[in-house]
Amino acid sequence: MLPLPAADKLIKIGVLAHREESLRMWSPTAEYLTRAMPGYRFVIEPYDNATIGPAVERSEMDFVLTNPGSYIELETKYGVTRMLTLRNLRQGKPYTVFGAVIFTLATRADIQRLTDLKGKSFMAVDKNAFGGFLMGWREFQDHGIDPLHDFSELKFVGLPQDPIVFAVRDGKIDAGMVRTDTLERMAMDGRIDLADFRILNPQRMAGFPFALSTRLYPEWPFSRTRNTPDELAQKVAIALLALPSGSRTAKASNSAGWTVPLDYTSVHELYKTLRVGPYQDYGRASFADILRQYWRWLALIALLIALMLVNTAYILTLNRNLKQSQKRLTEITRQLEHSNQRLEKLSLLDGLTGIANHRHFQEVLDKEWRWAQRHGTALTLLMIDVDFFKKFNDSAGHPAGDECLRKVAQTLYGLARRPRDLVARYGGEEFAVVLPGTDKQGAAAVAERMRAAVENLAIANEGLPEKKCITVSVGVARAGKLRHAATTEIVAAADKALYEAKEAGRNCVRIAPNDLKDIHSHGDVGDGGIAPPPLH
């Protein structure tokens, strides 16, 4: 290998996969980033479950690509931060969520539901495999089953997962579990017949066509390590978001590229529920923990008792000092409470634009989603993206880019006039608007006003050949009253509509074809899958 030019800085991407698999799938991504970012050279470094954590701790990599379960362990222990979420390509369509499927032979009359698996044999990938066991473990626990003790045999066979399917089909094991879409892929390859299997604890999720037995969880995240410079992370994120879905690089990783990072709270909750990984001692406190936390107080009590026995006069003096200390402590406590209130308020705002941040957006969306389901009211979401913002940044510079985002944010904020309406910075140059109690027509009108208002700012984009002004594209999605649904569905629907607005030429509004309620109930996309004509 030729030595690197002096100006090229080596950037390492750690991948949780076998060496051959990681190099085959992800080396094209490293090559793409090297081309997209002159002055840097990106390489892929493969790791396994045992080595990836220590490598992150030793700062042996700048970025890390791993499964959601491994990610939350690295996040909790070593401060890894997600930047993007993979748009995994399955049967020709991209998905940002996945789950697991639990199955048995269709001819097994004695196994109709999960609880029938008590006393039966079961096969999975690995005890610590996120999609290969932990997802199913959580569902078993919800049904009163302890998979570590209630099965006659619990067998782990590692990767690949296909042998699990064959073992169930051939009667060598009573039931098994694999990642979603595994059964459909094997059936398409002609290796199994789906009619031979019965899905246990079947779930139906709108927009997710594969057999499913568990909750859905976000796909693999692309993350930065604690010491990765902000500027480098921003450039990498912009480059990967710009990766075309049909490119050779995307196809090599069996994906349609990347999207903004999903919320991985559900993964943390799974690990907390099972008390595994970083949460194996969650909710437990040993005597040693109590002693370690309160030893100063215990030592002080012992000292006070000794002093009381020595001299009563000294105790009186100590009490006087203690009262003064309590007075100071009360004042300090009051100041801390005031500071905490200010910090809590600041934690809900985006540091650059001054509007709500992603965390506050998710909290409000969750609350309004529950309200809409409980009361049967409308809930509409707008996803807004600044068109050609990278070109603007490249030509005008980051300070001008930041000022542009502030102006756009304040313009959008000024048009959300009702008390419960929320305008938030979703991430990067993307914004989200939550409109409770608003139907599609009303939301479309708000979206059009916002689009027009940004265009009327007349912020010139010198990065475009035509020197057009800064504009935005808007995706609109509305949710009806749903059961067994998640906020990720309305976000995905609005994001898809936004993507269609981008495809339609930008600077326009696109509306998701039907309410999520209709999609959930009937399994179609409504209006023949054709978006309505643009409002501008």
Image: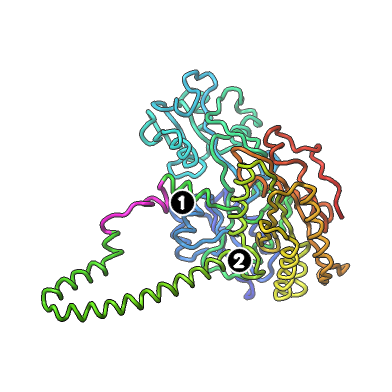
Q: Relative to residue 289, is residue 481 drawn left or right?
A: right
Few, some or many residues within 10 Å of mark 2 (<14, 14–19, 20+)? some
Given residues 17 and 482, the one toward you in this image is 482
Which of the two marks, 2 or 1, is nearer to us in this view? 2
Give the vertical position of 49 relative to 40 (above or below).
Answer: above
Given residues 33 and 460, the one toward you in this image is 460
User: Image point 73% across, 60% down: which residue?
Assistant: 417
Give the vertical position of 319 relative to 26 (above or below).
Answer: below
Q: Residue furthest left?
A: 310
For disc 2, the marked residue is 349
What stretch of residues is rendered in magenta? 275-288
The question of residue 282 being in magenta is answered with yes
- Pick the quarter of the image with the N terminus: bottom right
Residue 222 % position (x, y): 59, 56
For disc 1, the marked residue is 49
**Where is residue 313, by image quadrant?**
bottom left
Residue 4 appears in the figure: no
User: Image point 55% across, 21% down: which residue?
Assistant: 106
Type of amino acid under label 1? Asn
Given residues 304 and 456, the one toward you in this image is 304
Residue 141 appears in the figure: yes
Give the vertical position of 6 relative to 158 (above or below).
Answer: below
Q: Is mark 2 on a helix, strand or loop?
A: loop
Q: Do the residues labelled 2 and 1 touch (CB within 8 Å)?
A: no
Q: Residue furthest right?
A: 466
User: Image point 34% across, 77% down: which residue?
Assistant: 327
Magenta region, mostly helix, strand or loop? loop
